[in-house]
Image: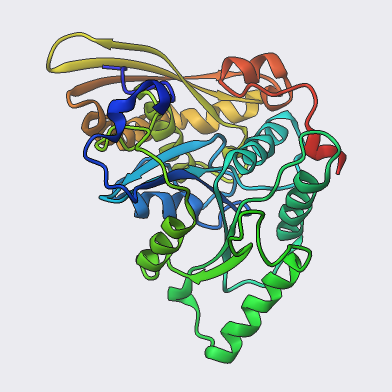
Amino acid sequence: MEELNVEHPDPLQNPGAETGVPADHRSGFIAVIGRPNVGKSTLLNRLLGQKVAITSPKPQTTRDRILGILTTEDAQMLFLDTPGIHRPLHKLGEYMVQVAADAIADADVVLWLVDINMRPTEEEQAIIDLLRHLTTRKRKRIQLPPLILGLNQIDRWHGDAEATAARVREYTALLDWLPEKTEDEQPALQTVLLSAATGAGIEALLALVRSLLPAGPRLYPEDQITDMNLRHMVAEIIREKALLLLQDEVPHCLAVEVDEFVERSEQLTYISAVLYVERESQKPIVLGKGGSMIKRIGQMARPEIEELVGTKVYLELWVKVWERWRRRQNLLKQLGYAVQQRQPWRHA
């Protein structure tokens, strides 16, 4: 049941990938970047028409790169949802920003998502600093791909055309160092207004993205929407429900690991997962009085997990303390956050 994880295919060794694809077919990677809690994961779910990325009101919900595969008749768009770019305070934060930097370096198009209802902040400046560093550093310098400025949450925007144009200029002014065109004569910067919540502007966004992608074959089967395996998806569902239920002091210190995943019959799957916190004082908050909170987390997560795996689920949740796990590289590695020793963006 865990064979959803697919190695990134090499189209040169898989000529059949182009079967039935029109001659003008396009494909490529789109890095979706932005500050924490700007709506990147909500947008990814909207684009795919189903949920692959967890969402919550808490910033920095996304901790890793999430691939969302959108296949149409004439394109395969591979969206990389990335952690919110911020100035990190610990090794987990360093890893999260490195994930975003790597996605930018690998992308054919970069979609920078901002909230039209907010003026640029220091978090946006951190993004600009990262983009400039990637294009000017001495080693592994990149040519920035075409950039789309996506002004999100227009459903909440009440400004007139003049106010809208002024807000767009505030953001584009941060990018006045960009050339007018990329090396392959594509516009270096274009803008689109959209709402991830309502779907407004999504068709225009997709048309723009497709126009910027290179010609190429499908890299994944047309019915595949992500490369995440079931264990990871289940852990993320549990973490999402915990984020929704727990107090503000816990979510950033919370990690979830699925340690057992067993298909006991065609109708029943057994799953055991551990919720890690950093301090002993946080453990009773996650457990709740008489285990009430951990029970609520399980009750909220179980229906979504059952829909995902296609069977009834017997779910057991445990809470353990890993002191300062966000600052300990060996523990981060065990959780799948393989932090590199040297982060090039730190030396901008």
Please indicate whether residue 224 sits to the left or right of residue 268 in the image: right
* Residue 162 place in picture, x, y as percent: 59, 91
In the image, farthest residue toward the left: 267
- Say which quadrant the N terminus sits in: top left
Please indicate whether residue 249 sits to the left or right of residue 156 in the image: right
- Which of the 4 image quadrants contains residue 245? top left
In the image, farthest residue toward the front: 23
Q: Nearer the viewer, residue 220 or 61?
A: 220
Residue 293 visible in the shown view: no
Q: Nearer the viewer, residue 12 or 157?
A: 12
* Residue 303 place in picture, x, y as percent: 24, 35
Label tally: 0
Residue 166 visible in the shown view: yes
Q: Which residue shows up at 56% across the image and 21% down it?
A: 336
Please indicate whether residue 237 sits to the left or right of residue 72 in the image: right
- Which of the 4 image quadrants contains residue 67? top left
Q: Which residue shows up at 18% across the image and 23% down it?
A: 312
Q: Which residue shows up at 74% across the image and 72% down it?
A: 173
* Residue 177 place in picture, x, y as percent: 79, 64
Please indicate whether residue 180 sits to the left or right of residue 46 in the image: right
Q: Is residue 126 above or below residue 333?
A: below
Q: Is residue 323 above or below residue 31?
A: above
* Residue 282 place in picture, x, y as percent: 60, 30
Q: Is residue 184 above or below residue 91?
A: below
- Say which quadrant the C terminus sits in: top right
Q: Nearer the viewer, residue 157 or 218?
A: 218
- Which of the 4 image quadrants contains residue 334? top right
